[in-house]
Image (cartoon, helix red, strand yellow):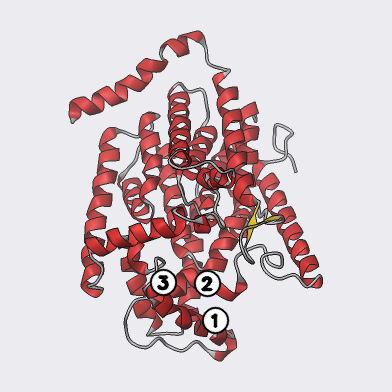
Amino acid sequence: MRDRNGLVPAAGIALGAVLLFLTASLAANLVALRQGKLFPFSWFLFDPADRFADFFKLSLSYPGPAVHAPAAWWHVDWLFARYYRWLDVFADSPFNNRHVPPFETMLALGQRALLTLADPMLVFSLLLAGSFALLCTATTRFVPATERARMIFVTLLGYPALFAMDRGHIYSVLCGALLIAAVARTLVRGEADRWSILLFAVALNFRPNAVLFPGALWLAGRMRFRELLFAGLGSVALLGLSFVVAHHFYPVYTPASLAKGLADYRAAYIGSANGLFYGSSLWGALLMFGVPDPLRTLLPLLVGGAITLVAALLARLEVVRASSFLFLVTSAYALSTTVFADYHLVIFLLPLVFLVREESAGLPRRGEQLGVLVGSVAMLLPKNFMFIPLGEERFLSTQVIINPLLLVQCALLVMILAAGRLRREQLRDLVGSFRRPVAGALQRA
C-alpha cells in the first residue's frame, strides 16, 4: 500500500522493519539454543532468570506485611525465590533503592502495599497493561485513524516496549507516554495548556533530564516562557509532595539517604562497566572506544546541547517540520544522558508519530525525513546479534555502539539537509531569532 505521493507510509515501513528484526532475533536465538549456547545468545532481551525484576525487586525492597503468594498456575515460584535471595544483598549494596527519585519511591511504596492484597503477578499484569494502554493512546491520539492499528503494533512489538515488559520497567513506559502526549498536545494545539503542563510536570519527576523537551519547545518558539515556568513549578511541587509522602511511609528515605543513594548509583554504573549493558548513550560508545573522563562525560553533554540548539533555531526559522525537530531533540535526549537504558528508547515513537501525521496530511517526504525515518525506526529494532566479551562470562551487545553512532549520523544528516534550505535573509535573522526569547525571559525575571 502506498500513500498519495506514491511512497510506502512511514507506519508501514516501521511495522515491516519491526517484524523483520523481531523474526531475525528469534531465529538467531533458536539457532543459538540448538548449538547449546546460553544467554545472551539464546535470548535477545534480558536474562530470563531475572525477568520482571525492575518491578518486583524494587517493590519488595521496601518493608511491609507479607506479600500475597502468586497462584501456582503462573509458575513463578522459582522467580520469586530468586528475588527474595537478592533482597538482603541489594539492601547493603550500591544497587539499593535509595537512589530512586521521590515520585517513583512513592509509587513503589504503593505497589508494595498492593502486593499484600492480591496475587502479585495479577497486580503486575494489570499495572503493566495500564501503562501500555496509556502509551498506545499517546502514540495513536494524533495520527489518522487509518494508521492507528499499525502504530499500535509498532508500539507494542518494538524492542523498547518488549524490553520494558521483560524487565517489568513500568516507569519507563509511563514516562514515555507522558512525554509523547505532552509534546504532541503542545505542538498540535500551538500552546502548552494546563493538561500539557501537568503531563510535563509528572514526566520530569520520572526523569528530570526530560526538561530538555519543554526547554527545546520554548527555544523553538512553540512554548511560552510562562508555560515553561509553570511546568517547572508544577514539577517542583510534585517533587516536594512525593518526598513528604515517601518519607512518611518509609522514614529512612531522607534527603541525605537520596544523596548517598545517587552517589552509590553513580559509582556502580557510571564509575564502572555496569552502565554499558543494554544502554544506548553516547557515553557508553565513548567508553568502549577508550575515551577517558572527564571528556567521556562532557562530550555527550556538548553534543546533546549543540543538537538541541540547532534544532530549536531551525524550527524557529520554519526550516524543519515537527518530525525533524522532534527527532533531533529526542536524539539529543538519548545521546546526552550518561546511562540511557534501552527501554527509554520508547521515546523515539514521538518523531515517528509526527512523521506519520505529516505524510497523512499529504506533505512530501523530503531528504531529511529519510534521516528521521531511519533513525527513529532503528531505535525501535532489536539488534542484539553480535557480542563483545567483557570480563568473565559477560558479553556486551554491539548495539551499545551501533545505536548512538546511528543517532549521531542521522542527526547530522537531518541538520545538514535542513540547513541547506536556509535563505540568506533567514541567516541574517538567525541570531535575532534566538536572542528575542532569551532577552524577554531575562526582562520578566
Measuring from the top left, give residue 26's x and y in whole percent.
Answer: 74, 63
Q: Amino acid at mark 3?
A: Leu
Helix or strand or loop: what does disc 2 sit on?
loop
| Label 2 with label 1: CB-CB less than 8 Å | yes
CB contact under 8 Å: marks 1 and 3: no
Circle 1 SS class: helix
Q: CA distance from mark 2 to mark 3?
A: 10 Å
- Image quadrant occupied by the C terminus: top left
Residue at 40% x, 81% y is 115
Quarter of the image with the N terminus in it: top right
Separation of residues labelled 1 and 3 (CA atoms): 14 Å
Q: Which residue is mark 2?
A: 52
How many neighbours does mark 3 have within 10 angstroms: few (below 14), some (14-19), or many (20 or more)?
Answer: many
Residue picked out by circle 3: 58
- Closest to the observer: 35 or 406? 35
- Between residue 12 and residue 63, name the one nearer to us: 63
Instruction: Using the numbered discs, state the Cα–Cα distance from disc 2 to disc 1 in whole angstroms.
Output: 9 Å
Residue beneath the point at 43% across and 61% down? 171
Residue type, mark 2 in image: Phe
Q: Is residue 396 visible?
A: yes
Label at residue 79: 1
For label 2, count other residues whose C-alpha is less than 10 Å away and answer few (under 14), some (14-19) or many (20+): many
Instruction: Compare marks 1 and 3 and give the one earlier in the sequence.
Output: 3
The residue under label 1 is which amino acid type? Leu
Res 23 → quadrant: bottom right
Residue 226 vertical position relative to residue 239 in the rendered view, above or below:
above
Can residue 362 be seen? no
Q: Secondary structure at mark 3?
A: helix
The image shows residue 32 at horizontal and vertical percentages of: 77, 67
Query: Would you call the spot at circle 1 few (<14 residues within 10 Å), some (14-19), or many (20 or more)?
Result: some
Q: Residue at x 43, y 55 (%)?
A: 175
